[in-house]
Amino acid sequence: MDLLHSGKVRDVYADGDDLILVATDRVSVYDVVLPTPIPDKGKILTQLSLWWFDQLTDIVPNHLISATDVPDEWRGRAIRCQRLRMVQVECIARGYLAGLGLREYEATGAISGVTLPEGLLEGSKLPEPVFTPTTKAEVGTHDEFIIFDDVIKQEGVDAANELRRLTVEVYRRGADIAAERGVIIADTKLEFGFDKRGALILADEVLTSDSSRFWPADQWLPGRAQFAFDKQFVRDWAAGTGWDKTPPAPAVPEEIIEATRNRYIEVYERITGEKWR
Amino acid sequence: MNASQTSADAADIIRRAHARGEQPQAYDPHQLVKDVAGLLRERGLSPDKYGRAGMATAAAGMLLRAFDILPATDYSTIDTASDPEMR
């Protein structure tokens, strides 16, 4: 099996015509991979992603071929999936104002050309979820907002409209389900690819904390930075060390690893309603 | 000639290739931007280092689609996105 790509937290292998996507236990904070893995993180996020795929099948087909037909050493953390032609647009849906979206709104009153109401604060809920596409940055650089018209030019009007519709629908479904379980999904990033017939397929992981902002609903308060559900322990710890957020990151203490692992499990259990084994 | 034969929409490029019994050609629009910037530098010009965000890759996507080439990459490019806190 050939290793095609090793990303910050996931590895991609080729197995004949299929791909094997392996979620590792690596964790990144401020875009830097920490030297200490979080045990079971890859398995938890893979199982959460599989659960979401089941909730979304009526909206969009996905790339999954099998969650069990994978090498034994990666069982639980790997999936066998289709090889797709990947769209070169980061498809982001935002339901709340945070991160670079907040910065863009404060500077221009809009995100990706979508004008938003005046007076919104950090963490504010948006009137409607919005599609805020970005370029796909190279490693070491950051994605930049693009307007929908640029997506039309790049992909064609039909594909662009479909990317926007699917991104917002997936976000709405995810946010509604999570809200019933006390979790706010503030935003999410989706990856799409074309299959051999030219249909858009949902790829990669979906609605996990590596691709989305999860906030506990009972602690949500617009006007300040929100408490991020699972990485907050490790993020707070990293900030407290005086680390300058450039590689290499310092080793993570055992108690922070354990607390972070427990939060990943809590998110999984709250959203799926299933006990992590 | 029907609409799908004339359309340069990304999905139509795939359908046309398969109708011909071929695999669709694909090329990364970001790479095309870099290629063109390199060509322009060779010609003595000084293109902006990154191109205007979106505008350059949008134009690259249009050009590729005009040539019936899909503006896309293979699957191995996933997991290059920044963390949610950086987004």
Image (cartoon, grey):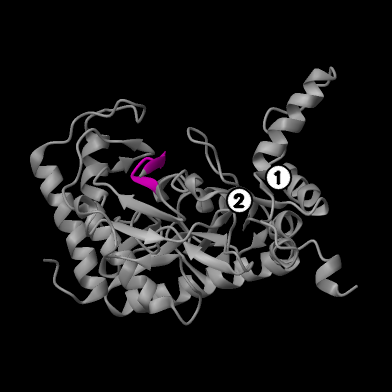
Report the quarter where the N terminus of chain A lies: top left
Q: Which residues are magenta?
A: A2-13
Residue at the spot 26% in from the left edge and 65% down from the top edge: A68
Q: Is residue B19 visible?
A: yes
Residue named by callout 1: B57
Report the quarter where the C terminus of chain A lies: bottom left
Residue projecting furthest to the bottom? A58
Q: Disc 2: which chain?
A: A
Residue at the spot 44% in from the left edge and 56% down from the top edge: A122
Residue B84 is marked as none
Residue B73: percent from left, percent from top? 59, 48
Residue named by callout 2: A88
Residue at the spot 18% in from the left edge and 75% down from the top edge: A274
Disc 1 residue type (three-letter) = Thr
The answer to whether marks 2 and 1 mark residues whose Cβ atoms lie closer than 8 Å is yes
Q: CA distance from mark 2 to mark 1?
A: 9 Å
In the image, residue A155 above or below residue A7: below
Q: Is residue B77 left or right of residue A107?
A: left
Disc 2 residue type (three-letter) = Gln
Q: Which SS class for mark 2?
A: loop
Quadrant in the picture for residue A55: bottom left
Observer-nearest residue: B16 or A7? B16
Quadrant in the picture for residue A70: bottom left
Residue A167: percent from left, percent from top? 54, 68
The reply to whether the magenta stretch includes residue A23 is no
